[in-house]
Image: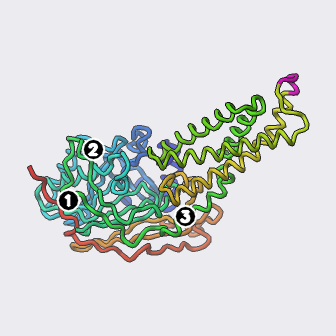
Amino acid sequence: MYPAATQKAYQHQLRDPYNMALPDANYRAPDGIPLYAIPGNHDWYDGLVMFLAFFARHESVHFGGWRTRQRRSYFALQLTCDWWLWCTDIQLADDMDQPQADYFEMIARRMDKDSKIILVSAEPGWLYTLRTDNSFEILGYAANIAGNANKGFTIPVILSGDTHHYSRYSNENNAQFITSGGGGAFLHPTHQLRDEITEVRPKENRKTLQPIQWLKKPTKLSLQPSRYPDRKRSRNLLRGNLFFAVTNFDLAVLLGIFYWLFSLAIFVRNRLDTYLVIVAAFVYALDAYTRYQNGDGVRIGLASAFHALIHAGVVFFLANWVARCNTNHLVLYDEWYDIWIRLSVTALEIIPVGAVIAGTIFGVYLAVTCAWCDMNHNDAFSAMRLDSYKNFLRFHIKGDEVTIYPIGLDRVPRRRDWEKNTSAAPGNQDQPLYVPKMPLQPHLIEDPVVVRADAGTTKPPKV
């Protein structure tokens, strides 16, 4: 639940859309379309209190025509005689606690031999192997539970969200690793995705986990010819950051205020040490911000230092330009009312101009580093607030095959593009309350993906 797991957020961002999509024909009826969910990192920000309040109750919670059915934050569902769905909870610590492990071990004991598992995790750990988190280990733990059952289970499909785009990798056994986070709050890029991931393995320094047996070590994952949006479009979308000062007006104004405060320091003490302190302040602040978002590294340090020097140079220019343009010299030691007048004049001159310049610099920095330096992917795209390129998956299971239909929607109607559905009368409650003025144009992102049950075969770990 983005950005915080509050009751209001759950109501307005989750429950209300379900109510509008399929109004509840009989609110008192316990029966309805089953609805299941696993928590993500934002759902855990309140300790999972609100998630459990909505999804893990003894009595079903109504989401329009849907009904919750689960009792935990993780679950397993038998889809057909042979196919199962295992949905794990990675928790904030990226770990699987003992109750969850015991649950899936119990499920594995009850499953028939040669069953097929669609494994679901809140995070695509295979995309995060270069990061310090351990989300891929949860998949490994769940896979080992399946392997330890010694019943010939296979895991042909591994699904996740978290990253707000669509991408699909596969390994040499044709197991499919699919990220479909198209319902996210904003779009994430795809141009940074590596064509091959060669070091897919969990960390081995945690005694509670065994190596993943259903993947050879190290395993190479190959990016299939499908990502949504495609690489070129993903980079082109970064042009929207040129308007950063408009789309992120509040941050731009804050930067303009800092420009003004640093300019005042120059007016009072126009010496070399003042300039050095200003440069140091920019370098420290922007380097800390960049490292917090992207981690450590020489590339990170050089990019943030260059970014800081540009801001500092603009401040020096603005301060000297304002000093020359004002007829009264900007020396702040006169009467108090004279000081306040001069402060106000310089604020009106520097803050608006500084906001536009600083915001534009910040936006260009995000665009360039995201496009070419493998940095700031989240911030560059969240700053543009793109709600386009939504996607979701449809599954068709028949015998030993599952066919996956990845569906994309390039453009989502804006608020003004919706209208009340006149067909949604009290006696016709199977219709949505609102419909788009122009028909939606969903399409297949790629050809349907057919996966056989023998893909991604598990092997019991050696004892």
Q: Is residue 81 found left or right of 385 in the rendered image? A: left
> Disc 1 or disc 3, which is closer to the eye?
1
**Mark 1 → mark 3, Cα distance in angstroms:** 36 Å
Say which residue appears at 27% left-offset and 66% top-offset: 171
- Callout 3 amino acid: Ser
Residue 102 in sight from this viewpoint: yes
Q: Earlier in the sequence, mark 3 or mark 2?
A: 2
Q: Where on the picture, by quarter, is residue 200?
A: bottom left
Q: Is residue 422 found left or right of 431 in the rendered image? A: right
Q: Secondary structure at mark 1?
A: loop
Residue on which disc 1 sits? 214
Residue on which disc 2 sits? 96
Q: Earlier in the sequence, mark 1 or mark 3?
A: 1
Q: Secondary structure at mark 2?
A: loop
Q: Which residues are magenta?
A: 333-338
**Mark 3 → mark 2, Cα distance in angstroms:** 34 Å
Q: Looking at the picture, does residue 24 appear above or below residue 331? A: below
Residue on which disc 3 sits? 388
Percent position of residue 282, x then y: 61, 39
> Disc 2 or disc 1, which is closer to the eye?
1
- Callout 2 amino acid: Met
Q: Where on the picture, by quarter, is residue 153?
A: bottom left
